[in-house]
Amino acid sequence: MELVPRDYYDPTPVRRSTSRQLARAHEKSLIERAAVEGAERNTAIAARERINNGYQLAALTTQHANHLHDLVTHVSRDKPGLEVGLRDLEDTVLYGSKAIILHYMTR
């Protein structure tokens, strides 16, 4: 069996209208690709901002929780009944803060 090289060159010239249609299709695909890349970039930026803001909320909550813990300790010294109530309030505030952060991070 003898291998014969094939000539894939088509000597028929491309019509001008076909060339224009190809150019339009190529431009459309470039525009669509740019739109998709832009949307992906915007999504990545929004995700990064949400993560950073979530960490800031957590840090702020930690600072306030520490301050509240110290305040409850100071106010309820030698008053166990008051301490129980204030610790319950402290837990409620922390639970609410956690719920707010969870809602923000998962919306």
Image (cartoon, helix red, strand yellow):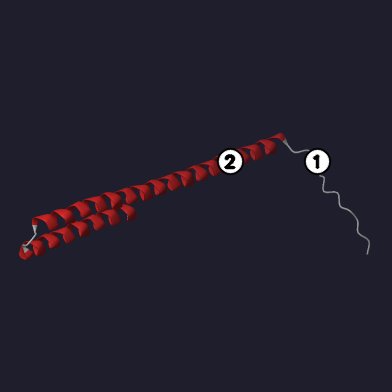
Q: Is residue 26 above or below residue 1?
A: above
Q: Amino acid at mark 2?
A: Leu
- Residue 5: horizontal and vertical position, in percent? 89, 53
| Element at label 1 | loop
- Crowding near the residue tagged with mark 2, few <14, some 14–19, many ≥20 C-alpha atoms within 10 Å: few
51 and 11: which one is in front?
Answer: 51
Q: Inspect the image, locate mark 1, and give the three-letter code of the amino acid beneath it.
A: Thr
Q: Earlier in the sequence, mark 2 or mark 1?
A: 1
Give the distance between the C-alpha atoms of the residues marked 2 and 1, in whole angstroms.
28 Å
Relative to 59, is 78 above or below? below
Residue 9 located left or right of residue 106: right
- Residue lying at 25% horizontally and 57% vertically, measured from the top left: 98
SS for dot 2: helix
Residue, disc 2: 30
Task: Using the image, determine if residue 9 lies above or below residue 75.
Answer: above
> Badges 2 and 1: C-beta atoms under 8 Å apart?
no
Q: Residue furthest right?
A: 2
Q: Which residue is mark 1?
A: 12
Q: Report the residue at 40% width, 49% height from top.
A: 47
Residue 104 in picture, x, y percent from top left: 30, 52
Q: What residue is drawn where x is 82% and y is 48%? A: 8
Q: Nearer the viewer, residue 64 or 39?
A: 64
